[in-house]
Image (cartoon, rainbow, N blue to C red):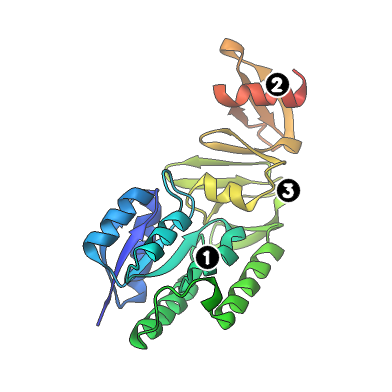
Amino acid sequence: MDLRAVLVDDEQLARDELGYLLGQVGGVEVIGEAGNGLEALTTIERLRPDLVFLDVQMPGLTGFEVARRMVDARASSHIIFVTAFDQHAIEAFEVNAVDYLLKPVDPSRLEVAVQRARRRISADLPVHRGATGVDTDQLEKIVQLVAEKQSRRDRLAIKVGERFLLVQAEEIIYASLADDSITVVTPKHAGTSNYRTLDELQARLDPSVFWRVHRSHLVNINKIKEIVPWFSRNYILRMKDEKATEIPVSRTQTRRLREYLKL
């Protein structure tokens, strides 16, 4: 029998991707979606799904706030958190989540999470036991997963042609989003990232080095070759790649750039 699931994420593309992956895994019927915390609570109460795939960072209520309200309401749905922010892994288990998946979601890890949820539901285990009821085996596994992810934070996989290459984060000159695809440029390579959004990619990188200077561009401030004044006191950045690519700085980021560089 299929598990009935609700997908909660403030990005439609993320929900679409997760729905597609669940279709590949099989055994899960997506019966509803929500784009923010308040909508999630209403949808969960109305549909009473077996399983909720819940993002952490959302407008209004965070995923954890949604989960805690579900606990207070003694909702019958089990929770799997899906997020780009791995620092929240331990907190996820304070509300007794079935599992915690990091974006971009690995299909094999998703399958494991679904199987874990199915076992818990089949065994009729309590949905919410509170912090004292955390499954220590699950906790140990998730801590190990986080540690592995953290150890790889200095590397990033990009697709160049038919190959996937691992590049050092510090080598990245810039990343740009166009046509729902993120291009990552280094001194030697230009390839596409498997991250769906620049927010997800930025969360993986050092925020003191990588700046979101525009909604479509993320730059390594150590790889700026030249700052060119532009209209209305804005700037264009010429980067240190072979093409000396020019990247616009949004009006909201111009002030930060001026302060940082003493312009």
Q: In what quadrant of the picture does the C terminus appear? A: top right
Q: Which mark is residue 171?
A: 3
Residue type at tag 3:
Glu
Image depth: mark 3 or mark 2 in front: 2
Residue that numbered label 1 is attached to: 92
From the viewer's perspective, is 239 left or right of 179?
right
The front one of 169 and 167 is: 169
From the top left corner, tell me how far across and down residue 2 is, in percent.
26, 78
Q: Which mark is residue 78?
A: none
Up the image or down, 15 lies above or below 27; here it is above
Residue type at tag 2:
Arg
Residue that numbered label 2 is attached to: 258
Separation of marks 3 and 1 at Cα, in angstroms: 33 Å
Separation of marks 3 and 2 at Cα, in angstroms: 24 Å
> Does dot 2 land on a helix, a strand or a loop?
helix
> Does dot 3 land on a helix, a strand or a loop?
helix
